Amino acid sequence: KYLVETLTHLEYGLAALQPEDEAFYEKLGWTVWKGNLFIKLNTCSYLTDEYEIMLYPLNIQMKDQLSNSSEEDTICADWREGELW
């Protein structure tokens, strides 16, 4: 709850995580992402489909987009130290 409130306050539209227990997060409203995953580093994007992530919409617009997503969709995040997702 704290994470969601903080990210919403900072005006992020979407939260992502790589869970160990999907069932736990599904009960909290997180959704399994079925589309392609990319990480952007400088000017290149790298496919990271070996990862499975869950997403949590932090506003109504993102909730609508996420509920209509498919395996054909793509999400890309900026590279960071440590775990990519």
Image: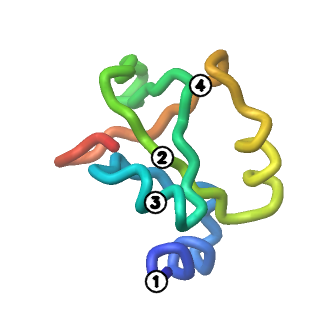
Cα distance between the residues tagged 1 and 2 = 17 Å
Say whether residue 29 is left or right of residue 21: right
Say whether residue 17 is left or right of residue 36: left
Say whether residue 1 is left or right of residue 9: left
Q: Given the current orientation, which residue lies at the most extreme left position?
A: 82
Looking at the image, is 10 positioned above or below residue 83? Answer: below
Res. 54 mark: 2
Indicate which label's residue lies in the foreground, 1 or 3. Answer: 3
The residue labelled by disc 1 is 2
Q: Quadrant of the C terminus?
A: top left
- Earlier residue among tags 2 and 3: 3
Cα distance between the residues tagged 2 and 3 = 8 Å
The residue labelled by disc 3 is 25
Looking at the image, is 84 positioned above or below residue 38? Answer: below
Q: Amino acid at mark 2?
A: Met
Name the residue located 46 percent from the left edge and 60 percent from the top edge: 25
Q: Amino acid at mark 3?
A: Tyr
Q: Amino acid at mark 4?
A: Thr
Name the residue located 72 percent from the left edge and 32 percent from the top edge: 69
Cα distance between the residues tagged 4 and 2 = 13 Å
Looking at the image, is 58 positioned above or below residue 33? Answer: below
Mark 4 is surrounded, within 10 Å at the Cα level, by few (under 14), some (14 to 19) or many (20 or more) other residues, namely: some
The residue labelled by disc 4 is 74
- Earlier residue among tags 1 and 4: 1
- Earlier residue among tags 4 and 2: 2
Q: Secondary structure at mark 3?
A: helix
Cα distance between the residues tagged 1 and 4 = 27 Å
